[in-house]
Every structure is written in structure tokens, then in C-alpha cells.
Amino acid sequence: MRFVIIGAGRVGLRTARVLRDEGHEVTLIEQDEAMIRRARSQEFPVVEGDGSREDVLEDAGITDADALGALTSDLNVNFTACMIANHYGCRTIMRIDEAYREGIYRKYADEVDEVIYPERLGAIGAKNALLGGTIRAIADIAPHLQVVELTVSNGAPVNGYTMGELQLPADATILAFGKRDQPLEIPNADLSLEDGDRLVVLADFDVLNEVRQLLVGETPDEAASNAGTDATSGTGGVN
């Protein structure tokens, strides 16, 4: 696949390296001379210019690209570039750096294919490392939704249930299930839940505490603490 990435800074260049390592073609757009030199020293093709200009995007190959990653720290540049790329039929990914407020997300989420917030993704990893054990946040889907992987504990209320007997809150859905030390797979109603089994759940933040209590065996206070104070305000459960 062919990708155009605007911004050769920390986020853009790392993304470009990952894509290239997987065999994809990547062209970067950048204005800063130091960043251009660094990207070219790593043998990336770089178009010098403003990524929110259509002629610059065309020079970078937007007409033949499969997707555009607008990954600069300038929200206006990113949004404008995505709108132009959309007219060329590209998948559009836009970076935001401002505080993760629901209003900002909703303003742009309907206009592009994906909105990413690198600092928040980093926070997910940091929180997982701090909490350890039975809870692992995987991704924020929207300001009020999160995908989490939960490990059933010996003291969990559902320990011993079958998947068919498991009843989660209405705003939570099981996406995958894995026995201890086994790969994740599509849930099977006849499989039993035992200590060490893992479930991947999509849940609204309003019910995430209840899901944790059921599957992990946390007390209400522990669930609220691990969810973070933002879980009750609707702005996200990973700080």
C-alpha cells in the first residue's frame, strides 16, 4: 500500500518507519529543515512544503495513495489536509493534541476516518504498566467507549459460569475470549470461565466498573479507582 504522512516529527517519523518495515511505500511531507534532513537520512522520500496545500499533496502522490496520515501538531493543517485527501478517495487519519474533550472529538470524528491522540495512546500503555495484573486497556473507540482485556480471577463472581450464562450490562459486549495461555478466539457459549481466562470487552465507561467487578472480582471501590476519575465524567477512563 501507499501512504502519505504529513509531519516528520516524533509521531510521523515513527509511523513511517513501522509502515516501511511492513513493506509499504511511504512519502513524508515536512516544512522544518532539520526534520527533513533527519527523514532523508533515514532514506525516506520527503516533499518539502505545507501539507494543507493541494499542490504539495499532489507532489507527494496523494492521487495514488491509499491513505493519508495528517500527523503534525497543527490541528488546522491536519484537518485541511484530510479534507483534500478525502476528495481523492484516501482513507484519512488525523492527529489531535489538545486535551481529550468530547467536543473536540465529535467536531472532527464525522469528517475523517480516524482521529488519533498520541498522548492518550501513550497514557493507555502507562496505565497498563502501573495497574498490571488483570486489567489491560486496549483502545479508546470514542470518548465514552473503551476496549479492555480482563483476566478472570479466582474470586470473580462469574468464575465457573459458562459463556452462555454470562450476562454483562446492556452497554458492554464480549468481542473475544481466550483460555489461560491460549490464543483469543470468538466466544463459544459452552466454554466455562475459569481463573486466568481472558475476555476482550467493548464497554461504555458508565458500565466499565460493573464489568470489572463481575469479571475480575474487584470491589466497587477498587473498580472505581482503577477506572480513573474521568470514567465518571464521560471524558475517558485512561488518564
Image (spheres, rainbow, N blue to C red):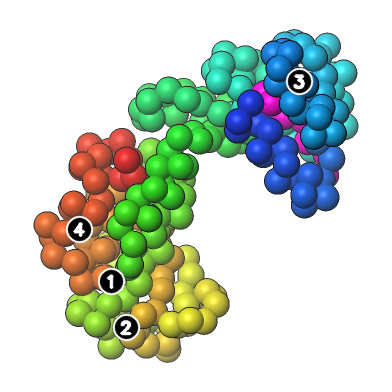
Q: Label 3 to label 4, Cα distance in Å?
A: 46 Å
Quadrant location of the N terminus in the rendered image: top right
Q: Which residue is mark 2?
A: 195
Residue 86 to residue 1: above or below: above
Residue type marked 3:
Ile
Q: Name which of mark 2 and mark 1 comes first in the sequence.
A: 2
Residue drawn at (21%, 42%) of the image: 229
Residue range (magenta): 1-8
> From where the camera sits, is residue 46 visible?
yes
At mark 4, the secondary structure is helix
User: Number of callouts in the render?
Assistant: 4
Q: Label 4 to label 1, Cα distance in Å?
A: 11 Å
Residue 59 to residue 159: above or below: above
Q: Nearer the viewer, residue 200 or 107?
A: 200
Query: Which mark identifies residue 223?
Result: 4
Q: Nearer the viewer, mark 1 or mark 3?
A: 3
**Residue 80 rendering spot, x and y as whole percentages:** 64, 15
Q: Is residue 66 in the magenta section?
A: no
Residue 207 to residue 89: above or below: below
Q: Name which of mark 3 and mark 2 comes first in the sequence.
A: 3
Q: Name which of mark 1 and mark 3 comes first in the sequence.
A: 3
How dense is the environment of label 4, judged by Cα within 10 Å: few (below 14), some, or many (20 and up)?
some
Tell me whether circle 4 and circle 2 mark residues in contact (CB < 8 Å).
no
Q: Label 4 to label 2, Cα distance in Å?
A: 18 Å
Q: Label 2 to label 1, Cα distance in Å?
A: 10 Å
> From where the camera sits, is residue 110 visible?
no
Q: Which residue is mark 3?
A: 36
Residue type marked 2:
Asp
Q: Nearer the viewer, mark 2 or mark 1?
A: 2
Query: Which mark identifies residue 215?
Result: 1
